[in-house]
């Protein structure tokens, strides 16, 4: 695009207003972001006082499995006792519905839950309510992580190296879980259980850094 004669003309009022509005909106957004981070910091503090690490909010049934012997119990406590009551008007009713073995997966129920920033009635299937409850810890984990200040410079490089190493360890764990010494004599002498334990220990150590 070429520069026209009007490029360096004085701003008219409409242009000035547009720039001013944009700056004001960004300032408000930055302030809201700072307040949100402060709020999530307090949440992390509440969890820490109870001995609950952020990684306990990750599902103990996925990827590496439980971090330690407390993971499952802590995860269930955070989900059912801490998060569900502030996300639903009838938390016990939801738990009873999704745990009722006589209810089919497509059976529907209506509960008032936090949706799009406000409490409102929602009709969902048993399977959908199970997902709603299961996602509560993960959603909290993601919100806290998004609110954290982004690392830059050397810190970012270090973080990237941790991420890369973690991905490689995850890949090694997945590969080991696929190994079957009974079908492949070339690995018959390998202690797969010990290897997996070592890899999981390394990943746990990595996530605590």
Image: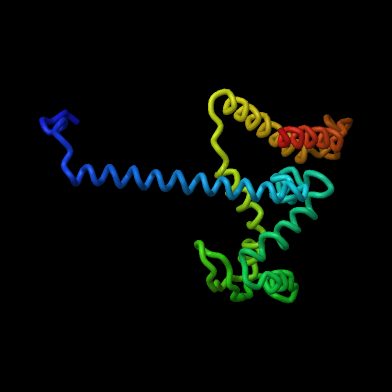
Q: Nearer the viewer, residue 72 or 42?
A: 42
Q: Quadrant of residue 109?
A: bottom right
Residue plotted at (62% across, 68% down) = 88
Q: Residue extending furthest left?
A: 5
Q: Is residue 84 left or right of residue 188?
A: left
Residue lying at 72% horizontally and 33% vertically, measured from the top left: 206
60 lies above or below 108:
above
- Where's the N terminus, which quadrant? top left
7, 179: nearer the viewer: 7
- Residue 91: image location, x then y, percent: 67, 69
Pinpoint residue 104: horizontal percent, then vertical percent.
Answer: 68, 73
Tell me which residue sits at (63%, 32%) in the image: 163
Q: Is residue 9 left or right of residue 117?
A: left
Which residue: 60% across, 29% down? 160
Position of the C terminus by quadrant: top right
Expressed as whole percent of the image width and height from the top left, the position of residue 173 reads 74, 37
Q: Residue furthest top?
A: 154
Residue 93: which quarter of the image? Answer: bottom right
């Amino acid at each position: 695009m070429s520069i026209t004669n009007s490029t360096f003309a004085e701003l008219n009022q409409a242009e000035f207003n547009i720039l001013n509005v944009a700056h004001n909106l960004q300032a408000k957004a930055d302030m809201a972001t700072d307040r949100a981070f402060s709020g999530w910091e307090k949440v992390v503090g509440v969890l820490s006082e109870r001995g609950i690490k952020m990684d306990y909010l990750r599902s103990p049934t996925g990827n590496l499995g439980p971090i330690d012997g407390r993971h499952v119990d802590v995860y269930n406590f955070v989900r059912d006792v801490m998060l569900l009551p502030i996300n639903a008007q009838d938390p016990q009713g939801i738990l009873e519905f999704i745990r009722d073995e006589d209810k089919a997966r497509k059976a529907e129920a209506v509960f008032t839950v936090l949706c799009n920033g406000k409490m409102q009635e929602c009709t969902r299937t048993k399977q959908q309510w199970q997902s709603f409850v299961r996602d509560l810890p993960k959603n909290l984990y993601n919100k806290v992580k998004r609110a954290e200040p982004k690392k830059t410079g050397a810190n970012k490089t270090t973080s990237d190296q941790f991420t890369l190493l973690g991905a490689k360890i995850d890949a090694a764990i997945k590969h080991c879980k696929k190994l079957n010494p009974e079908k492949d004599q070339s690995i018959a002498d390998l202690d797969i259980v010990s290897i997996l334990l070592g890899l999981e220990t390394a990943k746990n150590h990595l996530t605590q850094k």
